[in-house]
Image (cartoon, helix red, strand yellow):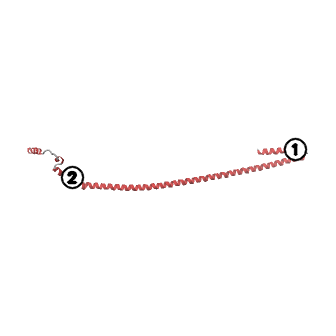
């Protein structure tokens, strides 16, 4: 052990404080070992890691390209569906306008038919009323003729049965006129 202690002391004495460029540059043995380690790591990266990284990047690029194509197809399909929807919407609006116009036309025809029917019914009512008035007038005239005939016969009987002087004739004519006037006034009520 004594020998080892001596070597250590000797090594400590021979080692001098590094200065200048020795502070920046590593020891030659360290430099060689670092270079060998770097080459091993670089060889490993080139043979194992880089191909896997490259494959992963290419797969990702392929996936992105597929997604872009899928998105473009979806966009095209969506645009087609939007165009189809707009076309259907326009057709539905046109159909709705057609139905509304037909309803208006139908309503106008119904209105015209109702007016024509009301006018026909009004004309029938007026015609029936006119017929009823004419019938009532005929009955009244027939009744009046009968009454006039009865009064005329009654007056003739009075004239035939007795002599009538001028004042009595005037009185009979006045009473006849009063009776006829009373009959026409009573028939109006």
In three-dimensional space, the C-alpha distance between marks 2 and 1, rounded to whole angstroms, equals 168 Å
Query: Can you name the residue that lies furthest to the front here?
Result: 20
Quadrant position of the N terminus in the picture: top left
Instruction: Label 2, secondary structure: give it.
Output: helix
Left or right of residue 57: residue 177: right
Q: Residue 119 or 17: which is nearer the viewer?
A: 17
Residue found at x 76% / y 49% = 137
Mark 2 is surrounded, within 10 Å at the Cα level, by few (under 14), some (14 to 19) or many (20 or more) other residues, namely few
Instruction: Label 1, secondary structure: give it.
Output: helix
Residue found at x 54% / y 53% = 97
Mark 1 is surrounded, within 10 Å at the Cα level, by few (under 14), some (14 to 19) or many (20 or more) other residues, namely few
Question: Which numbered marker is on residue 50?
Answer: none
Residue found at x 79% / y 45% = 184
Residue found at x 30% / y 54% = 57
Q: Earlier in the sequence, mark 2 or mark 1?
A: 2
Residue highlighted by disc 2: 38
Q: Quadrant of residue 185?
A: top right
Residue highlighted by disc 1: 170
Left or right of residue 158: residue 85: left
Residue 177 x %, y %? 83, 45
Left or right of residue 8: residue 114: right
């Amino acid at each position: 052990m004594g020998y080892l202690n001596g070597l250590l002391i000797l090594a400590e004495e021979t080692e001098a404080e590094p200065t200048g460029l020795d502070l920046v540059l590593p020891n030659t043995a360290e430099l060689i070992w670092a270079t060998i380690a770097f080459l091993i790591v670089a060889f490993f990266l080139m043979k194992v890691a880089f191909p896997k990284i490259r494959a992963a990047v290419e797969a990702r690029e392929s996936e992105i390209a597929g997604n872009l194509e899928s998105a473009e197809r979806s966009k095209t399909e969506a645009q087609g569906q939007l165009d189809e929807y707009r076309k259907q919407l326009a057709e539905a609006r046109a159909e709705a306008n057609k139905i509304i116009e037909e309803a208006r036309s139908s309503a106008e025809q119904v209105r015209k038919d109702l007016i024509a029917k009301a006018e026909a019914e009004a004309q029938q009512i007026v015609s029936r009323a006119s017929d009823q008035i004419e019938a009532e007038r005929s009955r009244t005239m027939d009744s009046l003729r009968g009454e006039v005939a009865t009064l005329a016969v009654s007056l003739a009987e009075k004239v035939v049965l007795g002599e009538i002087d001028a004042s009595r004739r005037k009185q009979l004519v006045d009473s006849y006129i009063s009776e006829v006037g009373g009959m026409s006034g009573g028939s109006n009520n």
